[in-house]
Amino acid sequence: MLRDSLDAYVRHDLGLARKVLAQDDELDELKTRVFRDLLACMLRDAATIEPSLDLILISRHLERIGDHATNVAEDVIFMVSAKDVRHQ
């Protein structure tokens, strides 16, 4: 997503920017699934708590990078087409 959003910016590519926006929901769902799966793992075995928490934090940070990539893609769409697609 990050690479695509930056490429969309450099190329003024609306299609690539829209692709990034579509991927944001997928990334949010993936982070939620990772959290649920790791929580279940922690409940089954206390020895997995520390590594699971590390992985949850990593997934949260990666999702945040995706949010920033989405913001860049939204800016590209505004820059190229003068349409504000934020918060839709």
Image (cartoon, grey):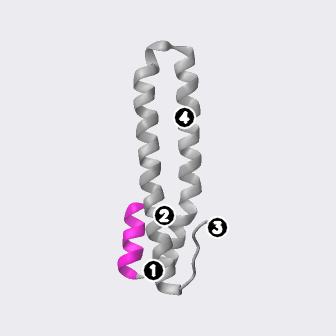
Q: Quadrant for the C terminus, please.
A: bottom right
Q: Earlier in the sequence, mark 2 or mark 3?
A: 2
Discs 4, 3 touching: Cβ within 8 Å: no
Q: How far across and down, in percent of the image, does residue 23 sit?
A: 54, 59
Q: Distance from label 1 to label 3 (Cα)?
A: 20 Å
Q: How far across and down, in percent of the image, does residue 77 sit?
A: 51, 78
Q: Residue 35 carries which label?
A: 4
| Crowding at mark 4 (Cα within 10 Å: few <14, some 14-19, many 20+) | some
Numbered disc 1: secondary structure:
loop
Q: Distance from label 1 to label 2 (Cα)?
A: 14 Å
Q: Which of marks 2 and 4 is nearer the N terminus?
A: 4
Q: Quadrant for the N terminus, please.
A: bottom left
Which label sits in the foreground, 1 or 3?
3
Q: Distance from label 4 to label 3 (Cα)?
A: 25 Å
Q: Image quarter for residue 35?
A: top right
Q: Tell me which amino acid carries mark 3.
A: Gln
Q: Distance from label 1 to label 4 (Cα)?
A: 34 Å
Q: Which mark is residue 70?
A: 2
Task: Look at 54% across and 58% down and name the residue there.
Answer: 24
Q: Give the range drawn in magenta.
A: 1-11
Q: Tell me which amino acid carries mark 2.
A: Thr
> What's the magenta bit mostly, secondary-structure-wise?
helix
The residue that mark 3 highlights is: 88
Which label sits in the foreground, 1 or 2?
2
Q: Image quarter for residue 37?
A: top right
Quick one: 61 or 26, which is closer to the camera? Answer: 61
